[in-house]
Amino acid sequence: TALNAAMLMHDAGMLEGVEFLGASPAAIKKGEDRQAFKECMIKIGMDLPISQYAYNMDEALNAANNIGFPLIIRASYTLAGGGSGVAYNIDEFKLLAQRGLDESPVTEILIEESLLGWKEYEMEVIRDRNDNCIIICSIENFDPMGVHTGDSITVAPALTLTDKEYQRMRDASFAILREVGVDTGGSNVQFSVDPKTGRMIVIEMNPRVSRSSALASKATGYPIAKIATLLAVGFTLDELTNDITGTPASFEPVIDYIVTKIPRFTFEKFPEAESTLTTSMKSVGEVMAIGRTFKESVQKALCSLETGLSGFDPIAGDLEFVKHEIRRPNAERILYVAQGFRMGLSLSEIFELSKIDPWFLTQLEELVIQESLITSATL
């Protein structure tokens, strides 16, 4: 990546006297190096998953023994979840750990406790040189933890957070940017929340404009990349205007509609590829739809995938197969959830299988009920 190339050149002394715009080398290291990031989070009192770092297979196996399965493996300095995955047993762990060590340019992996089933959120943040910070957009993952955010259906703004939880997350995002040292520009901060206890965990932060930044820009009409560039050369938020909305760039965007992003997969072109979704990204693109409600926007997004869907079309399979596909993270899981409701599965049964938030499941159940009423009606 550009960040990795810049850091390699900096460490080799090739950029002496060259100023980094936006994130400094120290900030990039704190954001991308998982050990340095962990130390930053501990310093400001943020909660983190139980984890250990490993630089070879012996250290990795020792960490696995200490923490216990299932485990999440994350490689440092990689893009799109490269070298990452979820291991449920020792054989899977050895394979994923070696791959992570091979793919990390600094031969470093983070092995952490599983947060599978927890809810996942992202905050898009902008900061200027005067320490003015604003949230551009909150994003919520439809899929629970365990699926790379690039492979997960996401909605903006976050729909199942209470105001208190949102403000906690907002304050934490600002504190993280300040501690990591992103002086100007945009960053993406990811959180996980235990739906049972409300415990909030910091997953990671990207000290750069990311894939989620592009989604947030389109969702809110706030040109994050353009504003971040102007901030990097010395402007402050109060000096800039959002050309799209005509409002000051220092205003936090407020939207009265729902944006849904659904990733696009092409497993049919790669029949030998593993279709189960994990922490390593597999999608090749995505669609975005806007609606007044989640029901409207998610159906628009399904129609936009260019896979022949006209919404929540019925999908083949007996009840046991449908339950299996609801449990397994995959590209068509949302369709199997709807099919499960058609077959008589209750909301609580589908929640236990998928761990998808009950609010989203309620929306899908209501769509299926409405579909049934329409199809059974006579002229």
Image (tube, grey):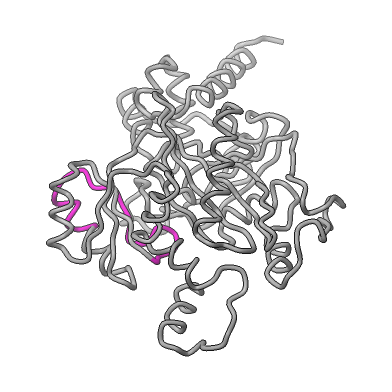
Position of residue 281 in the picture relative to residue 246 (left or right)? left
Residue that extends furthest to the top in the rendered view of this protein: 378
Place of residue 27 in the rendered image (x, y in percent of width and height, measured from the top left): 50, 66
Q: Quadrant of residue 330?
A: top left
Q: Residue at x 34, y 55 (%)?
A: 271
Q: Quadrant of residue 242?
A: bottom right
In terms of depth relative to the viewer, which is nearer, 77 or 85? 77
Q: Quadrant of residue 225?
A: bottom right
The answer to whether 97 is drawn above or below residue 373 in the figure is below
Where are the magenta residues, as a range? 77-96
Quarter of the image that includes the C terminus: top right
Q: Is residue 89 magenta?
A: yes
Residue that extends furthest to the right in the rendered view of this protein: 246
In terms of depth relative to the viewer, which is nearer, 81 or 285? 81
Position of residue 53 in the picture relative to residue 279 (left or right)? left
Q: Residue at x 42, y 55 (%)?
A: 40
Q: Is residue 78 magenta?
A: yes
Place of residue 157 in the rendered image (x, y in percent of width and height, measured from the top left): 64, 38
The answer to whether 349 is drawn above or below residue 51 in the figure is above
